[in-house]
Amino acid sequence: MISERHIEWTSPAALWDEFNGSTTADQRRVFRTPAILRFASDSFMQDFLGLMQAQPQRLGELLAAPEKWTNPLASVTPPAPVSGLRLRLAQARNSVVRRVEARKGIVRTTTWNGGGPPQQPLKLYHPAHQRYYLVAACLVCRTMGLPDRPLNTGAQEKASFVVRMLRPRSGAAAVNPDPLQCDELALVGGEWQSAADPASLQPGEEQNPLSPLTYVERDGRHRRLFNGFIPVGKRDALIGARQPSAASSPPPIPDNRQMLLKQQVLGPWSELEDLATRATTSSSYDSAMGGSDPGSGPKDAAIKKANEQIQMIAWYVLLDFSHWLESNAPAVWAAMQPGGSPATLQAKESILYNALGSLSSEGQTLRDALTHIRSFETSLEGTTHIYRQGQAGWPNVAFRFVTATLGGPTGLTGKATRKNLEDQLVAVLAAPPAGSALVPAPVVVQASGIPFDSPWFTLRCVLERPNCAALSAPVVSDPTAAFQLAAFFDSDAPARPIRIGMPADTTPAGLRKYDRNTAFVMSDVLCGQVSALKSLSFVDLILAVLPFPLHKDLSVGDPQPCSESGGGFGMVCSFSLPIITICALIMLMIMVKLLDIVLYWMPFFQICLPLPKKEGT
């Protein structure tokens, strides 16, 4: 393959003043390394453009380096905006100053993004931390004067950069490793793949755009600087992407059908058992609290109410379960229907069919309950009421997985029961179609996108020339310094200043002056539920979870939609935002102090300082 040897990516030309006289191989490598720039202002692009226009020699002040919120890097003051004759005079003065400084014979001996304490990693923080980062490089022709290599967009030439994950080899530093001592992984199709030749663009590798910026060099030439925004906010997606396993065989990928089973069936089933357990606890009598045993009447009433709630939820779980079976185990579902037969089922399907028939609740098998629940689908999906025993219009399916009793939950309880059925359900799943997504993206991010230890990354700039791809491969730069992408809640991360002003006058006379400008729009069903809850107090909520004799059931009746109780369709309520803010602060303080019993976090939670008093107040 023929390549244009005279094209090369280098560090930003505005940093070349730090290379004068003879250089070593290590220093020439620094010269070819793109730089990472760091900004601490939301107006970073305007500041960057203004600095490169008026004072490009200050680019070195923007170099990213290891920092913590306790020891941040020095802030960079952008130059005052100038234009016209004042700009040209400023550029002429800067050219003279740079020529004088160049005579000092400075030769840089360290990497662009080094510095800081020896064991402090280079971390890139989120925009939420008020930090922004750009990768910057120049594309030059390796001839006298290193002129810019023009980007021929008419020939579909494109400049971009790629993010590579690093796997340090034996002997590489544990902190800020040298990228040349690491294996590189390229992001291809949302998955990390080993890059056999790190200096080449991998087929299908995900790329990020580079934008050209033109500024005036000290000799009056217009120099082009390519820069690209580093997507730190994609940290979870980058880390959560599948990686090639170092083991002989990669771990199995969760099937989205299995995840849906956990979400719609197994998870709610487990919650029903927890609900029954809580009902048993709150219905017990604790003699240490004094008083007398209220007898079986109140206790039975509390258990009955819990079972009504369990029954209603169980119907919806059965409905979702039946749809899951129909979609993912159609042969078993067909055998369960009237007139169906298990004779044609395969071995694993027969095991599942028999397992569904062996699990029973309230005298009904799970197999029969799944079949019968579908005839009540329309009424269940359209109901706006809460189930109460004896009411008409509800399914006659008695199956409810778990039953609450004074002695504890009974029925299909325990993790082993759910795990055994899950294994049998997963065993009958057919192989997914080729090319289908096995795990939805949100599940991937939640499951593996938030590790405690962040891997190392590097960046490489790329020039593509598709019209001569057969003769010239893409030009790929040297790797930048290794860095980590900080987590959103990183203990080293700078904290963006947030100030919430509370109302000054919190007397009734002062609070009545604020507009009620925060509106909540509620449906007729939610309107009825909220109206039913208005009669409850905080004490009622506490008594509802305490054992007898202090236990008292919540009594809100059967909430009726507002449209059925004489009102209109739903309701719009407008609230005073200052009062909402005050309530949020009070509830925050209550919860923090309450949970301090377990978490011991009060000494690290707040610091309060008095406001200085103004004269005349």
Image (cartoon, grey):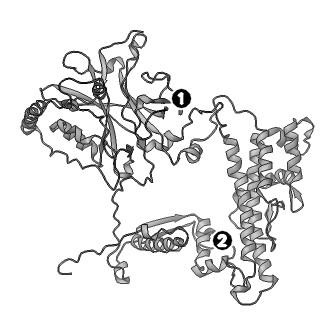
Question: Where does residue 515 sit, x and y in percent of width and height?
Answer: 37, 72
Question: Where does residue 570 sit, x and y in percent of width and height?
Answer: 56, 66
Residue beneath the point at 31% across and 45% down: 116
* Mark found first going from the N terminus, 2 or 1: 1
Question: Where does residue 410 sit, x and y in percent of width and height?
Answer: 82, 65
Q: Is residue 486 above or below residue 458?
A: below
Specify the quadrant that holds the C terminus. Answer: bottom left
Q: Label 2 belongs to which residue? A: 560
Q: Is residue 350 left or right of residue 218?
A: right
Q: In this figure, what is the number of numbered marks? A: 2
Question: Where does residue 279 sit, x and y in percent of width and height?
Answer: 73, 72
Circle number at residue 448: none
Q: Is residue 569 above or below residue 365?
A: below
Residue 329 falls in image quadrant: top right
The kind of secondary structure element at disc 2 is loop
Residue beneath the point at 17% across and 79% down: 615
Circle number at residue 193: 1
Q: Does the image show residue 189?
A: no
Q: Residue furthest front?
A: 171
Q: Is residue 386 left or right of residue 242?
A: right
